[in-house]
Image (cartoon, rainbow, N blue to C red):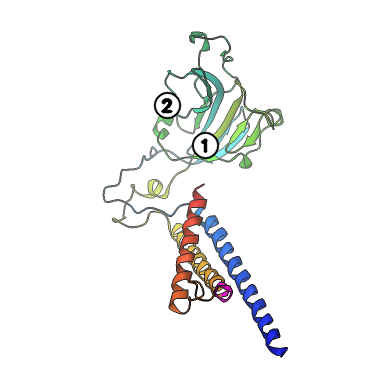
């Protein structure tokens, strides 16, 4: 009489462990897929009529470029320092490209802008005074002769993270890293008018512009990028496929265990065979769709 209750108890515990394992696998697959989707996006194919890339001048070479004022040295075709100051602007005035609005109240905004805004011409300058020009302004650095850096204006500039840079002690005492910027706002406080933020960008040659004309040798539909890029994308696809399979497996185990606890006659209790496999696949796919939504946040 006691053997059957013991067997029933062991079966219950096995079902609970199966449900816990399935839920854990489903959660791992969800987190894994979010991490994969937040990596670099997959490359697009080359269109039938691609827009030619902006190629640097033939004499452009990668060289060590120096910004003496900030003690920054980077290798590239060109380098530029972007300096923005938090300033007041009237809301009906044109917003300069690259400017960022921080706050707005009663017809005036606080914006990060490279351009120095003259507040003396405001309709209501009282309470909206901008400081004079800062000691540091935006500047470009190239190894070319003066004026030649205009050819790089529309190139593929890449932001250099502050973690890759070391500022001199006098500037490190003023600026701190925040995102992709060096910012003069003290830690734990909100930016105020007159604060500065600085970032560095570098222009590097691409294989297409360094070796051959843009898209040379490529046919319509061929993935863009180098061979290492193709390997990385293949590995990323394999990782996403494995995450999907893991989600389906976890969903299957959880549903199988849940069916054992379900009320007899319920939809969950009737799941078996092909129905269980189909339901597991749908739950796995839904989990991946939710992971995609979470990765976009």
Mark drawn on residue 147: 2
Q: Position of residue 160 (x, y in %)?
A: 55, 40
Q: Is residue 192 left or right of residue 210?
A: right
Point 44% across, 72% down: residue: 278
Q: Nearer the viewer, residue 226 or 65?
A: 226
Asked whether residue 261 is drawn in magenta, I would say: yes
| Residue receiving disc 1 | 201
Comes first in the chain, label 2 or label 1: 2
Q: Position of residue 195 (x, y in %)?
A: 61, 24
Q: Nearer the viewer, residue 192 or 18?
A: 18
Point 54% across, 60% down: residue: 30
Note whether residue 202 is visible: yes
Compared to residue 3, the image places residue 40 above or below, namely: above
- Secondary structure of residue under mark 1: strand
Q: Quadrant of residue 71?
A: top right
Q: Are marks 2 and 1 in contact (CB under 8 Å)?
A: no
- Secondary structure of residue under mark 2: loop
Asked whether residue 152 is drawn in magenta, I would say: no
Q: Position of residue 28 (x, y in %)?
A: 58, 63
Compared to residue 294, the image places residue 258 above or below, namely: below
- Please give the range of residues in magenta: 257-263
Main secondary structure type of the part rendered in magenta: helix
Compared to residue 268, the image places residue 66 above or below, namely: above
């Amino acid at each position: 009489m006691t053997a059957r209750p013991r067997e029933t108890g062991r079966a219950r515990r096995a079902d609970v462990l199966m449900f816990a394992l399935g839920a854990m696998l489903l959660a791992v697959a969800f987190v894994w897929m979010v991490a994969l989707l937040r990596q670099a996006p997959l490359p697009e194919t080359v269109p039938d009529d691609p827009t030619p890339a902006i190629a640097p001048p033939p004499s452009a070479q990668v060289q060590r470029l120096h910004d003496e004022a900030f003690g920054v040295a980077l290798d590239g075709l060109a380098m530029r320092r972007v300096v923005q100051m938090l300033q007041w602007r009237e809301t009906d005035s044109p917003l300069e490209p690259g400017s960022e609005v921080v706050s707005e109240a009663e017809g005036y905004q606080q914006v990060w802008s490279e351009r120095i805004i003259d507040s003396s011409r405001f309709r209501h300058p009282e309470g909206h005074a901008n400081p004079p020009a800062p000691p540091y302004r935006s500047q470009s650095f190239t190894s070319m002769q003066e004026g030649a850096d205009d050819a790089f204006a529309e190139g593929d500039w890449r932001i250099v993270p502050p973690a890759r840079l070391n500022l001199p002690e006098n500037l490190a005492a003023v600026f701190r890293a925040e995102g992709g910027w060096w910012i003069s706002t003290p830690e734990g406080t909100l930016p105020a008018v007159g604060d500065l933020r600085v970032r560095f960008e570098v222009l590097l040659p691409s294989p297409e512009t360094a070796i051959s004309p843009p898209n040379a040798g490529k046919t319509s539909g061929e993935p863009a990028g180098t061979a290492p890029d193709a390997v990385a994308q293949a590995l990323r696809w394999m990782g996403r496929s494995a995450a999907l399979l893991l989600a389906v497996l976890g969903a299957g185990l959880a549903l199988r265990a849940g069916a054992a606890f379900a009320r007899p006659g319920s939809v969950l209790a009737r799941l078996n065979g092909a129905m269980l496999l189909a339901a597991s696949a749908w739950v796995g796919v839904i989990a991946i769709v939710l992971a995609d939504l979470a990765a976009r946040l």
